Amino acid sequence: MWKKTLSAVLFASAIAVSTSASAEAPAPYPITPELEAAAKAEGNVVFYTSTDVAVAEKLAELFKSEYPGIAVQVERAGSERVFQRIGQEYSTGIYNADVIETSDAVHFEYFKRQDWLTALVPQVVADKWPAEERDPDGFFAVYRAHLSVLAYRTDLMSEADAPKTWTDLLDPKYKGKMVKAHPGYSGTVMTSTFVLSQLLGWDYFEKLGAQEIMQVQSSTEPPKKLAQGERALEVDGNEYNVFRLIDEGKPIKIVYPAEGTPLAEGNAAVLKQSPHPNAAKLFYAFLFSLEAQQLNSDFGGLRSFHPDVKEKADRTPLSKIKVLHSDPIKLEPEIPTIKANYEKFFGT
C-alpha cells in the first residue's frame, strides 16, 4: 500500500519546490574529541546502503578500527528497496536508520522535500568536494560514483566479437548470451535506462528486449553472473564489481561504448530522526574521509570526488571515458514511463 502511495506522491511532487530549498547550508563541522565521545556513548550506527555488501562491510570494519566501541549495522539492498524501506518507516513513525546511501539521486531530492534529512556538512566535504557534487543546502553529498558498463568474458567471447557500442547489442549473435539488471530495483540501472532512452530512443530497448536476456535485479548481479560463467556478456552491471572481479583474476573485460557510458552517483545523508545522531554525524563524516574513499577505490572499485584519492594504474580514468550524465530533476517525472516501458519490452 505504501509503495503505491509513495510512488503517486513522488511523481506528483516532481516539480515541487523543496521546503528547505531556500535554507542556508550549515557551517562545516570537524571531527572533534567531543563528537567521538558522544558517538561512543551511543555505541551504534545503522547504515542503509545500496553499495555491494562486501564493500559496505569492509567500510564498516575500517570505521570500527578507527573508532572502537561503535558498532556498525549494515543494511544492504537495491536502491529502490532502500527507498521504499525509508518511506515505510517514516510513514509509520518507525525510525531505525541513521545514515542512508543509494545510487539514485532522485531519492535524495524527494527525501529533502519530505524534510526527512538533517543538514550537515562535514569539513572534508566543504574543503574537498566540488560544489556540483553536494547539495547547496547541505542535506547530502555524493559519497561514491560508478559507471554502468558493458563487460564480457574473454574466455567465452573474443575481443573481435565483443560489442563496441550499445547498438551492437542488437546483433542476433548476442541473443541468449546477455544478462541485465532491472530499473525497478536498481538506481544505477534506472539512471542508465533513462540516459540511454534519451540517447537511443525506446525503439532501442524494444529491440533489445527481444534478445532473450537473462534478467536479474541489482546492478551488482550481472558481474557475478559473468564470474560464474552463466552468461558471456553483461548489458549494464556496475563497474566497481567488475573491477573487483578482474582484481581477483576473473577473465572479464570492460567495454566503454562509443556512444558514452552512464554515470551513477550515490548520495549519502543523515536522516532527521536518526536514533543515534552523534554516531551518525561521525560516521557520515567518515564516509567522505580520504581513508574511506581510498578503500572504496582500492577494494570497491568505486569512483571518488575526493581529489587526493589515487586510482589503480590499470583502470581507465574518467577523463579518458565519454561519460553520460543524468539530471535527477528531469529523471524523476520519467520514472513511471521507464518502469512501464521496461515491463512491456522485457516482460518483467
Image (cartoon, grey):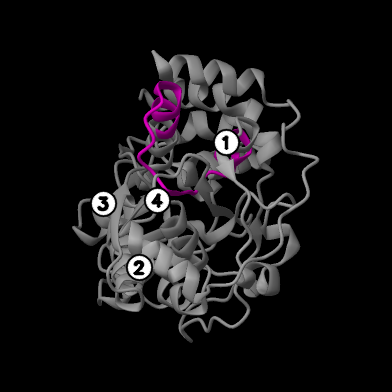
- Callout in the foreground (2, 4): 4
Residue type at mark 2 is Leu
User: Which residue, given by chain and number where applicable, does mark 2 sit on?
Assistant: 59
| Residue at image coords 35%, 40% | 96
The Cα–Cα distance between marks 1 and 2, rounded to whole angstroms, is 24 Å
Residue 161 appears in the picture as rendered: no
State which tag comes first along the sequence, 2 or 4. Answer: 2
Q: Are the residues at dot 3 and dot 2 in contact (C-beta closer than 8 Å)?
A: no
**Are there few (<14), some (14-19), or many (20+) residues within 10 Å of tag 2?**
many
Q: Check residue 121 in the rendering and tell me which mark sits there, or answer none.
A: none
> SS of the residue at dot 2?
helix
> From mark 3 to mark 2, how far is it between C-alphas?
30 Å
Magenta region, residue range: 86-110
Q: Earlier in the sequence, mark 1 or mark 2?
A: 2
The quarter in which the C terminus is drawn is top left
Residue 89 in which image quadrant: top left
Q: Nearer the viewer, mark 4 or mark 1?
A: 4
Q: Decide if residue 76 is on the left or right side of residue 291.
A: left
Secondary structure, mark 1, is helix
Residue 109 inside the magenta-drawn segment: yes
Of pointers 3 and 2, the one earlier in the residue sequence: 2
Q: Which residue is mark 4?
A: 276
**Residue 192: percent from the left, percent from the top?**
54, 45
Residue 21: give x, y in percent of width and height.
76, 39
Q: Secondary structure at mark 3?
A: loop
Can you identify the residue that label 1 sits on? 111
| Residue 190 counted in the magenta span | no
Residue on which disc 3 sits? 231
